[in-house]
Image (tube, rainbow, N blue to C red):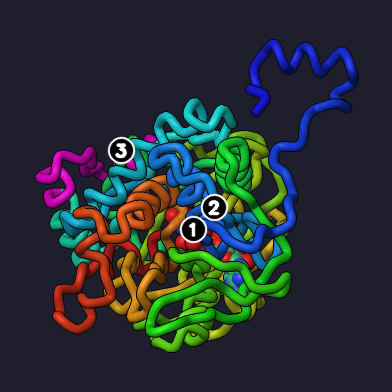
Amino acid sequence: MKRYSIFSLVRNALSYHENWPKAWRSPDPKPAYDVIIIGGGGHGLATAYYLAKEHGITNVAVLEKSWIGGGNTGRNTTIVRSNYLMPESLALYDHALKLWEDLSQDLNYNVMFSPRGLLHLAHNVHDMQEIGRRGHAINAAGVDSEFVTREQVKAMVPIINLDCRYPVMGGLLQKRGGVARHDAVAWGYARGADARGVDIIQNCAVTGFRMDGGRVQGVETTRGFIAAPRIGVVVAGNSGALAAMAGFRLPIETTPLQAMVSEPLKPIIDCVVMSNTIHAYISQSDKGELVIGGSSDPYNSYAQRGSFDQIEHVVGPIVELYPALSRIRLMRHWAGITDITVDRSPIMSKTPVEGLFINCGWGTGGFKATPGSGHVFAHCLALGDLTPMAAPFTMDRFHTGALIDEGAAAAVAH
Ligand SMILES: Cc1cc2nc3c(=O)[nH]c(=O)nc-3n(C[C@H](O)[C@H](O)[C@H](O)COP(=O)(O)OP(=O)(O)OC[C@H]3O[C@@H](n4cnc5c(N)ncnc54)[C@H](O)[C@@H]3O)c2cc1C
C-alpha cells in the first residue's frame, strides 16, 4: 500500500494527480477462503481489517451485493458518541470511541473524526430525570459526560430558541462526541484490509448458504459458490433475510430511517444537538450543509427512500427550535434500512449453524460503533468464540431476559 503523505501528494501533483494507485483492487472471488464476511459496510470492512491486522488472518473475502459503503454506512448522519446507560454498552461504545480517536492515523486515511461535542437536550421533567440517571451512570463508569444548564445550552448554540413549544430545560454534554466522514470510514477500512491481502468483492450478493451436518460450508452467490469454514454476517437491515437463508429467525424488526441535508451555509452550529423528545437532531457538515434527522419510520419496510410526511415530522421541530433556519432550502433527503432489537442493543452472536456468526441489530445508531464492532467481531471470528466484550450481546439474551435496555439512550438518538 502506498502511504498517503505530504510527500506523495507533492509527487503526484507533478503528474496532475493522474497516477495515484487504486485504493483497493477488484479481484475475482477465489473458490475458498478462511473467513468470509458478508456485507461491505463499515462494520464488515472493519472486521476484515482487524482480522488481517491484529490476527494475521488475511485469506478473507468481503462480499458486498452492491458497492461498499452504499448501505447505512453511507446514509447515516455520522454522529459518534459513547454516552449510553448500561455498563455493557458503555464498555463497547467507549472502546469504539477510543479507536475513533486514532483512526485516521491507524488507517493512514482521513476519516475526518471531529470531536466537536454532542448535546442531548432535555425538554421536560422526564427528560431531566432520564439524563440525570444516564449521566450519573456514565460518570460512574469513568466515561466523560456533564450536565449543562439552559443558559449554557444557549451559549453553545446561540441560534437556539429555548422557549419553544417544548422549552429547553438543560442538557447532557459529551465533549468527546462528534461526527466523522462516513464514506471515508468505509474507504479507509477497505484500503487497509485490501493492502493486507483481503479480497473485497463488490456486486456479489449472497443468495444462500451451503451446509453439512449443521455446519456451514460456504455461500452461494451471484458469482458462484465460495467455500469457507467460518462466516460472519454483517448486513444491517438485511440481517433477517440472511438469517432466513440460514434457517433461523432473528429478534429484530427492519425499519427505514430517514435523513436530509440543507444547502451549504457558513458556520452556524459547531456541535451536534439532539432532542429525543421532539424527534429531531442537527449538526453542520464541514461542507456547511445542515445534517438533519429524526426518528425511524413508524412501519417495517425494506425501502431505502424518503417520504414527505417524515420531512414534515422532522423539520417542524427543527424550525421551532432554530427559527433562523426556516428559510433554508433542503438539498437531499434519503433513507436507510435499520435492524432494530427490542432492547435497542446490538447482537454479536454465534448462530444455530456452526461456523456462522452474526453481527447486527445496531439499528439507528451503529455508525459510532464501527471501529469497536469490527475490532470485537474480528476477535470473535478469529477465536471461533465470543470475547468478554461481545458475550453480553448474544441472541440468548432474548431467551434469558438479560436484556441491555438502551431504549432511552438509543431509540431516537443515533
Ligand atoms: C438515516 C440514518 C441515520 C443514521 N444516523 C446515525 C448516526 O448519526 N450515528 C450512528 O451511530 N448511527 C447512525 N445510523 C445507523 C448506522 O448507519 C448503522 O447502524 C451502521 O452504518 C450499520 O453499519 P453496517 O456496516 O452494519 O451496515 P451497512 O453499511 O448497511 O452495510 C451492510 C452491507 O451489507 C450488504 N448486503 C446486504 N445483503 C447482502 C447480501 N445478501 N449479500 C452481500 N451483501 C449484502 C449491503 O448492501 C450493505 O452494504 C443511521 C442510519 C440511517 C439509515
The span from disc 2 to disc 1 (Cα, nearest Å) is: 5 Å
The span from disc 1 to disc 3 (Cα, nearest Å) is: 50 Å
Judging by the rendered image, the residue that carries numbered circle 1 is: 35
Comes first in the chain, label 1 or label 3: 1
Q: Position of residue 153 (x, y in %)?
A: 34, 42
Residue at image point 81% right, 18% down? 12
Whether the magenta-drawn stretch holds residue 321 is answered as no
- Position of 147 compared to 264: left or right? left
Residue 281 visible in the snapshot: no
Judging by the rendered image, the residue that carries numbered circle 3 is: 152
Identify which amino acid the numbered label 3 is placed on: Gln
Residue at image point 33% right, 81% down? 352
Residue 359: numbered disc = none
Q: Report the front residue among 169 and 397.
A: 397
Q: Position of residue 293 (x, y in %)?
A: 53, 61
| Quarter placement of the N terminus | top right
| Residues rendered magenta in the picture | 136-156
Identify which amino acid the numbered label 1 is placed on: Val
Q: Is residue 396 above or below residue 177?
A: below
Comes first in the chain, label 2 or label 3: 2
Judging by the rendered image, the residue that carries numbered circle 2 is: 60
Q: Are marks 2 and 1 in contact (CB under 8 Å)?
A: yes
